Amino acid sequence: MTNRPNPRGLWVTLEGGDGTGKTTQADHARRYLSEIGRDVIRTREPGGSPLGDKLRHLILTEEMGSHAEALLFAANRADHIRTTVEPALAAGVDVVQDRYIDSSVAYQGYGRDLDPAEVRLLNMWATGGALPELTILLDLDPAVAATRVGNRGEQDRIEQEQDDFRVRLRDGFLTLAATEPDRFVIIDAGDTEAQVAGRVRSAITERLLTR
Ligand code: T5A
C-alpha cells in the first residue's frame, strides 16, 4: 500500500464537536484499515487506558473549574500516550483515536475561558509533543450536531453546553485546521454515514500513500 514503507503504525485522530459522528467514523476507519491488512487498534479520549477510564468518569460527572478540567484531560492524555498509543505505534500497529489534543484546545481554550495557546502548550508538555500523522476534522453545523446528540437521550456535563459554546467550538476547530493544513483534513459530516465514511477512507488512503 505504501510507496515508502514506514515501520511505525499510522496514527489517525478524529476531531469535531459532540455529535459530529466521530465514534461512528472511528469504527469505519478501524474496519477499513483492518480490511486492507493492517494491524489496528481503536481508542478514545477521555479514556483509553485503565487510569484514563477513571479520569473519564470524573471529568464527565463532577462539576469543576476550567483549569482543573484542562489538567485532568492532560493527565489522561499523558497516561494514554505512554501506556497505549506510543507502544502500539512503535510495534507497527495503526491507532485510530477518537479525540486528542485538538479537543482540549478547542473545548477548554476556544470554547471555555482558557488561552488556547496555553492549553496547547500544557498538552504538548504532557505528551512529549506527540502529534498524529493525520487528523480528520468532522465539520458539522452545531444545530444539526445538537439534534443528533439530543436524539440519543441523556447528555453528559460537557454535551449540555449552550449554542454559543458550540459555535465557538466549531470556529476553534476550523482555526486549528487552518493552522496545520498538512496534518488536518476537513470533512463535511453533514451527509449520510456511508458518504462520510467514504471520505474518511480516501483521506486515510492518501496519507498511507504519501508517508
Ligand atoms: N472533551 C474531550 C473536552 O472538553 N476536552 C478534551 O480534551 C476531550 C478529549 C467527551 C466530552 O469531553 C469533551 C468533548 C465531549 O463533550 P464523549 O462521550 O467522548 O465525551 O463525547 P463525543 O466524543 O462528543 O462523542 P459523541 O458520541 O457525543 O459524538 P460523536 O462520537 O461525534 O458522534 P456519534 O458517532 O456517536 O454520532 C452521534 C449520533 O449521530 C448519528 C449516530 O448514529 C449517533 O446516534 N450519526 C449520524 N446521523 C446522521 N448522519 C450521519 N452521517 C451520522 N453519523 C452519526
Image (tube, rainbow, N blue to C red):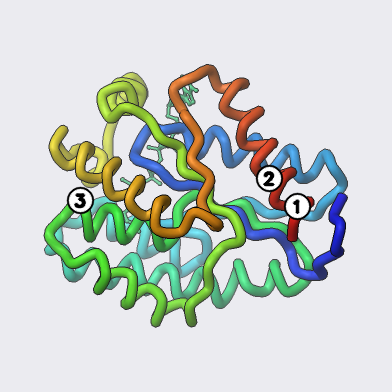
Label 1 environment density (alpha carbons within 10 Å; few <14, some 14–19, many ≥20): some
- The answer to whether the residues at label 2 and label 1 have Cβ atoms under 8 Å apart is yes
Q: Dot 2 lies on which element?
A: helix
Image x and y of residue 158, in percent? 24, 46
Determine whether, in the image, residue 57 is placed left or right of residue 42: left
| Residue at x-position 16% and y-position 65% | 114
Q: Name the residue under label 1.
A: 208
The C terminus sits in image quarter? bottom right
| Mark positioned earlier in the residue sequence (1 or 3) | 3
Quadrant in the picture for residue 206: top right
- The answer to whether the residues at label 2 and label 3 have Cβ atoms under 8 Å apart is no
Q: Dot 3 lies on which element?
A: helix
Determine whether, in the image, residue 6 is placed left or right of residue 141: right
Image x and y of residue 152, in percent? 36, 24
In the image, residue 25 above or below residue 111:
above
- Amino acid type at mark 1: Leu
Q: Mark 2 points at which residue?
A: 204
Label 3 environment density (alpha carbons within 10 Å; few <14, some 14–19, many ≥20): many
In the image, residue 94 above or below residue 196:
below
Q: Mark 3 points at which residue?
A: 111
In the image, residue 97 above or below residue 36:
below
| Residue at x-position 24% and y-position 64% | 116
| Residue at x-position 68% and y-position 45% | 204
- Amino acid type at mark 3: Gly
- Report if the beta carbon of the residue with label 3 is closer than 8 angstroms to ligand 1: yes
Image x and y of residue 40, in percent? 73, 53
